[in-house]
């Protein structure tokens, strides 16, 4: 069947074009014309479709079936394509300062990368033409958020990677129904993705993972609600519903429409008395958001339910409550470090119907990564992500990792044993508390609360953390990651802060804002806090504050701190319960804070410059004054 939709014929390999609204057909036809795939496959999101595609990928060697698991597969990528590439990620707007703030002269801007439409045309014009030659273009209709929900948004992704098709159907809601939704609403986000390896391939294909890492470009066009990603098949570079759409494009939609698209987990915590609180928490990549979203409480009687582990879309309802949905349908979690102690719920979630990428594989057909040493038979042989076979202990001895530090599991959220029973409620959940946090080895207390909304926005703006493997950074350093959105900002960060401040309107019930740090170290380098399931103790305190308990907090220069003894330490090891440990967890070394605030101020002044909203400058002045008087 070769229907003609006006530009070039769409040579259909599979699917039903008659169900595709005309403006979506035009979009497909435009990119068929440019990318020249050998055929077009319109996905319907069905299990049969996934099964067929999976079998093909196993035959080809892109996926390996994990024999000891239930419907799980391993993918090993080209070692040159293993993480998000922030340096090649751009936002394209006519006006530069819609995308990036006015940085100080001579300063290298860190909050977003702008490209002019002319340069983008040149860059993409030298990559896209013919980029899908010899490959099939898959058309993925997907929804971020429950299909047709009031807070949800539809998208169409075109891609020449069937690994992407399979991952997108886990991470988003892929369904032919979307064509109807789009037909009625008109709007959809245009997502174009190519691995950049037309046939015959020029670059040597490694691990059956064709890609073009030297020419990667990930471009967002917020004004056109469009994303074009070229060269990489990995994670946030290629699953365009996630970072590109649900954060970068959606933050622009949110600015225009008065809501928030944030890099936040969503969870509920129910106290032993049966009171449920909803929490959204922003942490930079690889700070344990997934662990926190599904933590197993160590305090008796508490229950945690997970709504989402990475992204929150939040909008005030008519009663002035901020309601959040998780726009995603799956978890794309970092594998190393995940085990039955740190995150038993994630382990249970990814025991079936999961695609693992760049982890090790045991000779029995199970998975292995650093952190599972105690859970996998030490005599078993593992083939590492780079293909070398060794015993577990020998990986450690040789210093070679069995799994890449950014290796992932891609698994359906519905399989999480503690997924909230109403996690797909299209209306979302009312958020009581927003938490910001990062990896801060020094100086920053376990938890503190902002004095008010604007002070809370400053806590988010001042967020810093040790760097991670989720992007291409090398080594450990403390990096600014304002609102945990540095790599995901869709527009001028000063305007973004202004948007946050402006949300605080009379009649609205603003969530309380907190800052946490699970990662403070002792002088001998050991953690002062056990973390993981014991973080419920901090959540317990946060819930008390949300409920208005005044006697559990004391004012300090940086915010409200817990009064000594107000965090429940029952059942913890004695070493955590000493007054000395409390002092180490909550102390505010003056020199540290004087320097910290000076450095934050310098960062915001130089990076956001004249775009920094006055209320934030005022908050910094007040903070600096309070610290000077310490
Ligand atoms: C992620 C990230 O993959 O934040 O979620 O990098
Ligand atoms: Mn993330």
Image (tube, rainbow, N blue to C red):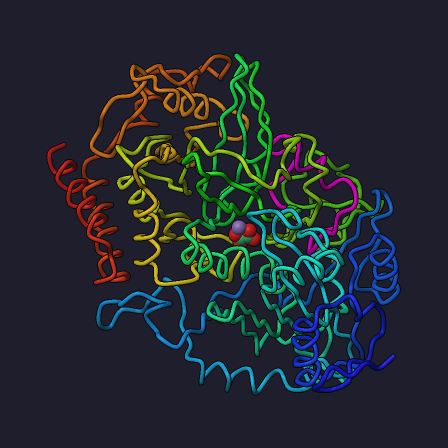
Q: Is residue 480 above or below residue 446?
A: below
Furthest residue in direction front, as rendered: 184
Residue, x 54% and y 46% (percent of image)? 310
Percent of width and height locating residue 360: 72, 51
Bounds of the magenta span?
334-360
Which of the image's four quarters has the N terminus?
bottom right
Q: Is residue 400 visible?
A: no
Q: Is residue 343 magenta?
A: yes
Lateral position of residue 175 relative to residue 597, left or right: right
| Image position, residue 560 (x, y; %) | 27, 27
Residue pictured at 85% horizontal, 45% vertical: 364
| Rendering coords of residue 208 (x, y %) | 77, 69
Q: Is residue 379 above or below residue 448?
A: below
Count of marks overlaid on the render: 0
- Is 328 displayed left or right of 380 in the figure? left
Which quarter of the rendered picture does the C terminus lie within?
top left
Which of the two residues, 586 or 9, is positioned nearer the viewer here? 9
Q: Position of residue 143 (x, y in %)?
A: 65, 54
Seen from the viewer's position, the closer of residues 202 and 392 is: 202
Q: Quadrant of residue 559?
A: top left
The relative height of residue 574 versus residue 135 in the rendered view (above or below) is: above
Q: Residue at 16% of width from left, 37% of height from top?
A: 627
Residue displayed at 38% across by 67% down: 99
Q: Does residue 626 belong to the magenta stretch?
A: no
Residue 232 seen in the figure: yes
């Amino acid at each position: 069947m070769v229907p003609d939709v006006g530009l070039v014929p769409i040579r259909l390999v599979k699917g039903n074009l008659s169900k595709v609204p005309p403006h979506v057909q035009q979009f497909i036809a435009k990119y068929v014309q440019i990318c020249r795939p050998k055929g077009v496959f319109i996905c319907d999101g069905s299990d049969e479709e996934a099964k067929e595609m999976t079998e093909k990928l196993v035959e080809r060697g892109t996926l390996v079936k994990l024999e000891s698991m239930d419907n799980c597969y391993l993918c090993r990528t080209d070692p040159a394509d293993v993480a998000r590439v922030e340096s090649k990620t751009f936002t394209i707007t006519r006006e530069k300062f819609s995308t990036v703030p006015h940085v100080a002269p001579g300063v290298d801007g860190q909050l977003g990368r702008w490209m002019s439409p002319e340069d983008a045309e040149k860059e993409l014009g030298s990559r896209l033409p013919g980029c899908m030659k010899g490959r099939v273009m898959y058309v993925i209709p997907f929804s971020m958020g429950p299909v047709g929900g009031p807070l949800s948004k539809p998208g169409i992704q075109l891609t020449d990677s069937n690994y992407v098709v399979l991952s997108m159907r886990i991470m988003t809601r892929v369904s032919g129904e979307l064509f109807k939704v789009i037909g009625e609403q008109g709007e959809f986000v245009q997502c174009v993705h190519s691995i950049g390896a037309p046939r015959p391939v020029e670059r040597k294909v490694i691990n059956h993972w064709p890609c073009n890492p030297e020419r990667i470009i990930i471009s967002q066009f917020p004004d056109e609600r469009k994303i074009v990603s070229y060269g990489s098949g990995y994670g946030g570079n290629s699953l365009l519903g996630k970072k590109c759409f649900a954060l970068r494009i959606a933050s622009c939609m949110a600015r225009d429409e008065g809501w928030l698209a944030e890099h936040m987990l969503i969870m509920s915590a129910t106290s032993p008395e049966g009171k449920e609180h909803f929490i959204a928490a922003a942490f930079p990549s690889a700070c344990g958001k997934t662990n926190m979203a599904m933590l197993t409480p160590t305090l008796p009687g508490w229950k945690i339910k997970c709504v989402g582990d990475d992204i929150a879309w939040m909008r005030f309802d008519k009663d002035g409550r901020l309601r959040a949905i998780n726009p995603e349908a799956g978890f794309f979690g970092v594998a190393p470090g995940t085990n039955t102690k740190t995150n038993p719920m994630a382990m249970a979630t990814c025991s079936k119907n999961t695609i693992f990428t760049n982890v090790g594989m045991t000779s029995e057909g199970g998975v292995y990564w650093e952190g599972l040493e105690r859970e996998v038979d030490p005599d078993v042989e593992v083939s590492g992500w780079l293909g070398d076979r060794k015993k577990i202990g020998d990986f450690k001895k040789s210093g070679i990792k069995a799994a890449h530090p950014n290796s992932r599991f891609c698994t359906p959220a519905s399989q999480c044993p503690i997924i909230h029973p109403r996690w797909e409620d299209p209306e979302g959940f009312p958020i009581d508390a927003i938490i910001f946090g990062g990896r801060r080895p020094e100086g920053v207390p376990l938890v503190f609360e902002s004095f008010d909304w604007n002070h809370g926005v400053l806590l988010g703006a001042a967020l810093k953390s040790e760097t991670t493997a989720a992007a291409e950074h090398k080594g450990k350093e403390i990096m600014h990651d304002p609102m945990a959105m540095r790599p995901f900002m869709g527009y001028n960060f000063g305007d973004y802060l202004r948007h946050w401040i402006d949300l605080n309107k009379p009649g609205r019930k603003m969530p309380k804002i907190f800052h946490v740090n699970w990662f403070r170290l002792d002088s001998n380098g050991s953690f002062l806090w056990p973390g993981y399931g014991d973080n419920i103790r901090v959540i317990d305190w946060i819930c008390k504050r949300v409920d208005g308990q005044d006697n559990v907090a004391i004012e300090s220069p940086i915010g409200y701190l817990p009064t000594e003894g107000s965090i429940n330490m029952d059942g913890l090891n004695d070493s955590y319960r000493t007054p000395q440990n409390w002092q180490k967890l909550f102390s505010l070394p003056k020199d540290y804070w004087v320097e910290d605030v000076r450095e934050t101020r310098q960062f915001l002044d130089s990076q956001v410059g004249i775009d920094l909203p006055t209320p934030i400058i005022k908050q910094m002045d007040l903070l600096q004054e309070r610290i000077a008087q310490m």
